[in-house]
Amino acid sequence: MPYELLPLPIDAKTLHGLSPSLIESHHANNYGSAVKRLNLIQEQLGETDFDQAQGFVPNGLA
């Protein structure tokens, strides 16, 4: 089951000192990229034959 990008849990306009666009951009780009990468790693781990794979293959997924 792939991980899903959750919506921003707060109203970005309520944070003082940080612009809402900065918060929303960070959420979409940083958190969103981490979720996509996690799903990719999980998919690649599912396709890996650990009996045949060399040690650097699973190590390189992290």
Image: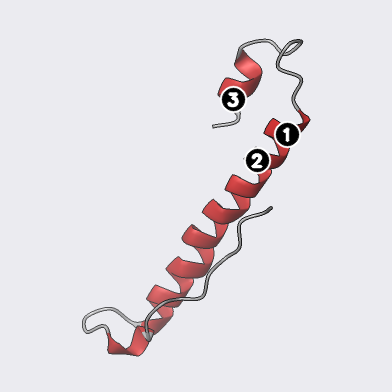
Q: Residue at x 48, y 60 (%)?
A: 31
**What distance separates the C-alpha of mark 1 from that of mark 3?**
14 Å
- Left or right: residue 19 compared with residue 37: left
The residue beneath circle 3 is: 60
The residue type indicated by label 3 comes to: Gly
Q: Quadrant of residue 23?
A: bottom left
The residue beneath circle 1 is: 46
Mark 3 crowd level (few <14, some 14–19, many ≥20, 10 Å Cα): few
Residues at marks 1 and 2 touching, judged by CB atoms closer than 8 Å: yes
Residues at marks 3 and 2 touching, judged by CB atoms closer than 8 Å: no
- Left or right: residue 12 compared with residue 4: left
Placement of the C terminus among the 4 image quadrants: top right
The residue type indicated by label 2 comes to: Gln
Dot placed on the residue nearer the N-terminal end, 3 or 2: 2
Coordinates of residue 39 in the picture (x, y in percent): 64, 48
Foreground mark, 1 or 3, reads 1
Badge 1 marks a residue whose secondary structure is: helix
Is 16 situated above or below 38?
Answer: below
The residue beneath circle 2 is: 42
Coordinates of residue 2 in the picture (x, y in percent): 67, 54
Dot placed on the residue nearer the N-terminal end, 1 or 3: 1
Coordinates of residue 40 in the picture (x, y in percent): 67, 44
Query: What is the total number of numbered labels drawn onto the structure image?
Result: 3
**What distance separates the C-alpha of mark 3 from that of mark 2?**
13 Å
Badge 2 marks a residue whose secondary structure is: helix
Q: Quadrant of residue 9?
A: bottom left
Q: Residue at x 72, y 13 (%)?
A: 53
Q: Residue at x 72, y 40 (%)?
A: 43
Is 44 situated above or below 59?
Answer: below
